[in-house]
Amino acid sequence: MLKILILSTSVGALGSGQGGGIELTIQNVARELQSRGHQLQIVAPVGSTVAYLAVIEIAGNLHIPVQTQSRDVPVDLPDNSVLANMCAYANRVQKDWDIIINFAFDWLPFYLTPFFQRPIAHFISMGSMTVATDRIMSETIKQYPHTFGVYTKSQAASFPFGDDCEILGSAIDLSLYQFNNSPQRSLAWLGRIAPEKALEDAVAAANITKLPLKIFGKMQDTDYWQQICRDFPNAPLEYVGFLGTEDLQRELGKCRALLMTPRWLEAFGNVAIEALACGVPVIAYARGGPTEIIRDGETGFLVEPDRIEELVAAIDKIDSIDRRQCRLQAETEYSLSALGDRFEAWLDKVMKSRG
Ligand code: UDP
């Protein structure tokens, strides 16, 4: 059994939604590893709330999400960086732990890896983002092979060191998601309301089909949202808000399909497996993670990216999907126990490679 110290994302408190899917992944991985007997503590920004898990809350200023910045942005940290403070804490207590898992997509923890005595396993939650993060990651994995885990193959392929990453996927606690076989008319869109998610394409498709679109998620970019509302004044849309898993799965389960319209290379897309678990088929742009999740024609449709007419065509044939197949796929491929097995095997490799 391992003593595992987890470094959380530095862009928001756990539970705030600001960090996106990695928040759910951290909680799910931590709960599963803890249930297997590993000892565990999460180091996260102040305000983080995680049921059943020990959290050390660290003060400091949050980091700017890297996807809002240009590729050539220099390495910068906010004054009194929460991540610097989290790393300082981890450095102080490291002798009490066997291994550190870093979930922050930031330059600093990679740079600091050689300065720690304990091994650091890095879980990378996005595709290639900046020149500086690519460079520090490349140098780190060269020095510490096997220490990088990612969600998917398509995400890994965006990095120069992609072939050296462990593909770990994602998972959810299926017992929290109820199968719903009696959908209403509405479509769903789920995620952070931010330009890389291209909500406007889903709104445009809803506007054409005249099917109501229910929008769930963290309001990250208000100007962007208001622009969408101005561009589509008569679209049948409803912003429901940012919901906790219990309410989210209940409302999501009532929808006929989930639309996923990433403009960026989606690393995974936790929302896809949450929808499948509720029996909701997923219509997604064939870009990144969704291409490795959705079975085209069986549990949803993969369509040519950035083509609204393709979204509309897929919506028109959504009733050909058997919702039971969606739930079945979630149960067979995205259970926490499968993810726990992959994480344990990876951590074992990291421990052995650091000797
Ligand atoms: N989410 C949520 N409540 C909502 C809408 C979304 O908790 O009302 C969560 C959802 O469970 C998922 C995350 O937001 O874990 C979005 O993650 P995803 O991997 O799809 O995209 P990311 O934000 O990481 O790019």
Image (spheres, helix red, strand yellow):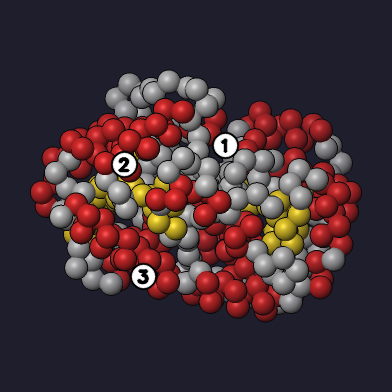
Res. 13 image quadrant: top left
**Toward the viewer: 219 or 326?**
326
Which-is-in-front pick, marks 3 and 1? Answer: 3
* 194 w.r.t. 23: above or below: above
The residue identified by callout 2 is 142
Res. 116 image quadrant: top left
Q: Residue at x 27, y 45 (%)?
A: 144
Which-is-in-front pick, marks 2 and 1? Answer: 2
Q: Quadrant of the C terminus?
A: bottom left
Q: Residues within 10 Å of mark 3 (few under 14, many from 20)?
A: some
Residue 154 appears left or right of 62: right
Q: Where residue 6 sits in the image (x, y, percent)?
A: 28, 51
Marked residue nearer the N-terminal end (3 or 2): 2
Q: Secondary structure at mark 1?
A: loop
CA gap, disc 3 to disc 1?
A: 34 Å
Q: Could one spot residue 214 in this view of the protein?
A: no
Q: Residue at x 27, y 60 (%)?
A: 349
Give the residue type at disc 3: Asp
Q: Residue at x 74, y 46 (%)?
A: 305
The residue identified by callout 1 is 220
- Cβ of mark 2 under 8 A from ligand 1: no
Q: Where residue 293 sits in the image (x, y, percent)?
A: 60, 62
Q: Secondary structure at mark 2?
A: helix
Q: Where residue 201 sits in the image (x, y, percent)?
A: 76, 43
Q: Quadrant of the N terminus?
A: bottom left
- Which disc number belongs to residue 341? 3
Give the residue type at disc 2: Lys
Residue 197 appears left or right of 7: right
CA gap, disc 2 to disc 1?
A: 35 Å
Name of the residue lying farthest toward the left:
95
